C-alpha cells in the first residue's frame, strides 16, 4: 500500500502530526514507532503512566529508553576552566530518550513551560520568517487545556491538560524555596507561561491527577479509531530511499526483518539524536563525514548533526533536619525560578527549582519498581537544580559507522565557552545562597555540595563545575531551521528539508536555538505547525 503520509517517530511531535493529518478522512497516514505501543490505558506500564504525583516518576524502564550515551566534551576551550586530573574530558552521560508511542513526552518530567517571546524574536533575527511569538501563540493555545488560566494567552480545548499545584499542596521544601527567592528580591509570578514571565512561581505541569499526559494519551488515544491512521510499533527506521530529489520509500527494521513503505510525503520526527543518524544513512548530510564512512552523498547538508543544543545543569545539595518529614509520594517539583544571570545580555537565561527530596544517586538510575518505602532508604536531603537555559556551547551528532543499527557518537560540549561557565557559576552561587537562606532554616541541616571551600574562589568553583555539570536532557537543533543564506540550514521555515522535495522534519531538532524553557511544549507546538503546513 502507498500512503499519503508516513510519519517516522510517534513522539512528542510525531504523534501530533499523525493525529492532525488523519483528521482528514480522505488521506492515509502511517505512523512508525521504534518502541512499543500501549493502545489501552489500563495496560500502560506504571513508569509511563504516572507523573510527578507519585514516587514512580523516578526512573524509566530500559524497554522504554533508547539507551543513548554522550560524551560531555571533546575538549575544553573555555579559559575559565582549570585543567585538573579529576575533571576528565571524556566523562560519559546517559541520555534517556523515549522509546515508546509518545516518545520522550512519555518519560519526561512533565514541566509544561513554553518558549519565551525572546526566543522567537531571536529566531526571527536569524532570518527565519513566520516563527515570531504572534505566529506560534495560536498553536501553543491549540495544544493545551489550561485548568488555571484562560484569556488570550491560554487554550481551553486542547488535548494536553496543564495545571499548577496550588500553594496549599506545596511541600515544605517548595514553600521554603519560594519564600527564600522572594526574600532575595525575585518577584512572584503565578503564571510562568505568560509572555516573558520571570520570577518565582508554580510550574505548569502536564500531569493532571498524577497521570503523565503524553502525546500518546492526548493525541493518539482519541485518533486510534480512524480507519485512515495506521500505527506500527517496534519498527525502527534505518534510512530513506531517494530517487533524485524525492524520497520514494523508507526502509524499516522490525523483529530482525527489513521492509519498505512508500508514501507521497514523509515527516521525520525521530528526535534530535536519531534524525541526523537516519538522514546521514540516507545520504543526506555533511559530504566529508559521509565519505569517511563510505556513504554516498545525495544531498550535501553540512548542518545535519551539527549545532546540538542543551540546557546544562548542576546541583546544590543539603541534608535536612528531619529526613522522615520528606514526603516521597508528593510531587518532586512544584515551584521554579526564572531569572537573568548577572551581567547577561540575554534576558531570562537561567532556571532553577527545588527538588522536594534528593537521593544518594542519579534518580534516573533508580530501579523503576521501587516502592515509596524503598525510595525512602535512599533519601539524603533536598536539592536545588540550576540550569543554563540559553547556552552558547554547541555539540554534535556523528555516525559511528556505516551500519544503521549502530548508535551515533554524541558530543554535548557542555560549558565549552567562558560565557556558559560564568553563568553557571553565578547560578550555583545564587542557589547556594537560597539553600542557606533563613526561610529554609527549619528544613536544612547543612549544605553539603558545593562546600564553602569550593565556593571560596573562582578556580575551585570552576573546577567543580567541570566535574559535575550534566545534561538537562533538552536536546535540540541538530537539523536546524534557518535562512537561505546560512550554509548550516537543514530545513526551511516550513520545516522542509533543503534539496528534498517531499521530506519534512517535525520535532525539537528544527529549533535554531534551544528555547529558554523545558523543550517539550515547544516541540509539541512544532508538531502542530508542521501538521498545519501539510494540511
Image (tube, rainbow, N blue to C red):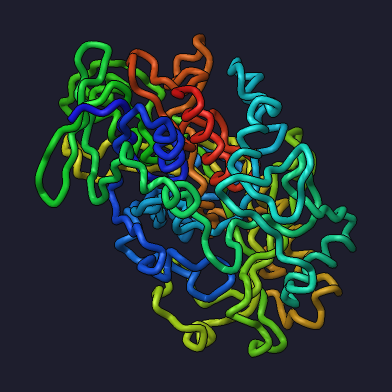
Q: Where's residue 513, x and y in %?
A: 57, 32
Quarter of the image for residue 62 reads: bottom left
Q: Residue furthest left?
A: 257
In the rendered view of the protein, which quadrant contains the N terminus? top left
Q: Nearer the viewer, residue 447 or 85?
A: 447
Compared to 364, does 377 lie above or below?
below
Q: Nearer the viewer, residue 159 or 377?
A: 159
Compared to 395, does 160 lie above or below?
below
Quarter of the image for residue 288 reads: top left
Compared across the picture, whether 61 is left or right of 444 comes to: left
Q: What residue is at 31 percent from the left and 16 percent from the top? A: 300
Q: What residue is at 53 percent from the left and 14 percent from the top? A: 483
Q: Where's residue 117, x and y in %?
A: 72, 33
Quarter of the image for residue 420 reads: top right
Q: What residue is at 64 percent from the left and 65 percent from the top? A: 333
Q: What residue is at 34 percent from the left and 59 percent from the top? A: 38
Compared across the picture, whether 399 is left or right of 491 comes to: left
Amino acid at each position: 500500500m502507498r500512503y499519503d503520509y508516513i510519519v517516522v517517530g510517534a513522539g512528542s511531535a510525531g504523534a501530533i502530526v499523525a493525529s492532525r493529518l488523519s483528521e482528514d478522512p480522505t488521506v492515509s497516514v502511517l505512523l512508525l514507532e521504534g518502541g512499543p505501543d500501549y493502545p489501552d490505558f489500563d495496560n500502560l506500564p506504571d513508569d509511563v503512566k504516572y507523573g510527578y504525583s507519585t514516587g514512580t516518576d523516578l526512573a524509566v524502564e530500559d524497554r522504554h529508553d533508547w539507551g543513548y550515551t554522550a560524551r560531555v566534551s571533546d575538549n575544553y576551550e573555555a579559559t575559565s576552566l582549570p585543567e585538573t586530573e579529576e575533571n576528565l574530558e571524556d566523562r560519559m552521560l546517559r541520555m534517556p530518550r523515549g522509546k515508546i508511542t509518545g516518545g520522550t513526552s512519555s518519560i519526561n518530567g512533565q514541566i509544561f513551560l513554553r518558549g519565551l517571546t525572546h526566543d522567537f524574536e531571536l529566531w526571527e533575527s536569524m532570518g527565519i520568517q513566520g516563527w515570531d511569538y504572534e505566529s506560534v501563540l495560536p498553536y501553543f493555545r491549540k495544544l493545551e487545556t489550561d485548568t488555571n488560566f484562560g484569556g488570550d494567552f491560554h487554550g481551553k480545548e486542547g488535548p494536553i491538560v496543564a495545571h499548577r499545584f496550588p500553594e496549599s499542596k506545596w511541600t515544605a521544601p517548595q514553600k521554603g524555596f519560594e519564600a527564600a527567592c522572594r526574600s532575595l528580591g525575585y518577584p512572584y509570578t503565578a503564571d510562568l507561561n505568560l509572555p516573558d514571565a520571570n520570577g518565582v512561581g508554580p510550574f505548569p505541569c502536564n500531569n493532571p491527577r498524577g497521570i503523565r499526559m503524553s502525546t500518546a494519551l492526548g493525541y493518539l488515544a482519541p485518533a486510534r479509531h480512524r480507519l485512515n491512521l495506521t500505527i506500527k510499533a517496534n519498527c525502527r527506521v534505518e534510512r530513506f530511499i531517494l530517487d533524485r530529489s524525492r524520497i520514494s520509500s523508507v526502509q524499516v527494521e522490525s523483529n530482525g526483518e527489513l521492509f519498505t513503505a512508500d508514501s507521497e510525503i514523509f515527516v521525520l520526527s525521530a528526535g534530535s539524536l536519531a534524525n541526523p543518524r537516519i538522514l546521514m544513512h540516507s545520504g543526506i548530510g555533511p559530504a566529508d563525514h559521509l565519505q569517511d564512512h563510505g556513504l554516498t552523498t545525495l544531498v550535501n547538508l553540512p548542518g545535519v548533526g551539527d549545532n546540538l543544543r542543551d540546557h546544562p545543569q548542576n546541583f546544590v545539595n543539603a541534608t535536612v533536619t528531619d529526613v522522615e518529614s520528606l514526603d516521597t509520594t508528593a510531587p518532586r517539583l512544584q515551584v521554579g525560578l526564572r531569572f537573568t544571570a548577572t551581567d547577561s545580555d540575554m534576558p531570562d537565561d537561567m532556571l532553577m527549582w527545588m527538588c522536594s527530596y534528593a537521593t544518594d544517586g542519579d534518580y534516573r538510575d533508580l530501579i523503576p519498581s521501587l516502592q515509596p518505602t524503598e525510595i525512602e532508604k535512599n533519601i539524603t536531603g533536598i536539592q536545588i537544580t540550576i540550569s543554563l537555559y540559553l547556552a552558547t556551547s554547541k555539540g554534535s551528532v556523528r555516525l559511528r559507522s556505516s551500519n544503521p543499527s549502530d548508535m551515533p557518537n554524541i558530543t554535548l560540549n557542555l560549558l565549552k565557552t567562558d560565557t556558559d561557565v560564568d553563568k553557571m557559576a553565578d547560578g550555583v552561587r545564587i542557589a547556594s545562597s537560597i539553600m542557606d537562606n533563613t526561610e529554609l532554616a527549619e528544613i536544612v541541616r547543612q549544605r553539603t555540595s558545593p562546600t564553602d571551600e569550593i565556593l571560596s574562589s573562582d578556580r575551585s568553583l570552576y573546577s567543580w563545575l567541570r566535574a559535575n555539570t550534566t545534561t538537562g536532557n533538552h536536546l535540540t537543533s541538530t537539523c536546524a531551521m534557518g535562512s537561505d543564506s546560512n550554509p548550516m540550514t537543514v530545513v526551511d521555515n516550513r520545516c522542509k528539508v533543503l534539496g528534498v522535495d517531499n521530506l519534512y522534519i517535525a520535532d525539537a531538532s528544527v529549533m535554531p536555538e534551544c528555547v529558554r524553557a523545558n523543550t517539550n511544549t515547544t516541540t509539541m507546538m512544532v508538531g502542530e505547525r508542521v501538521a498545519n503546513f501539510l494540511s
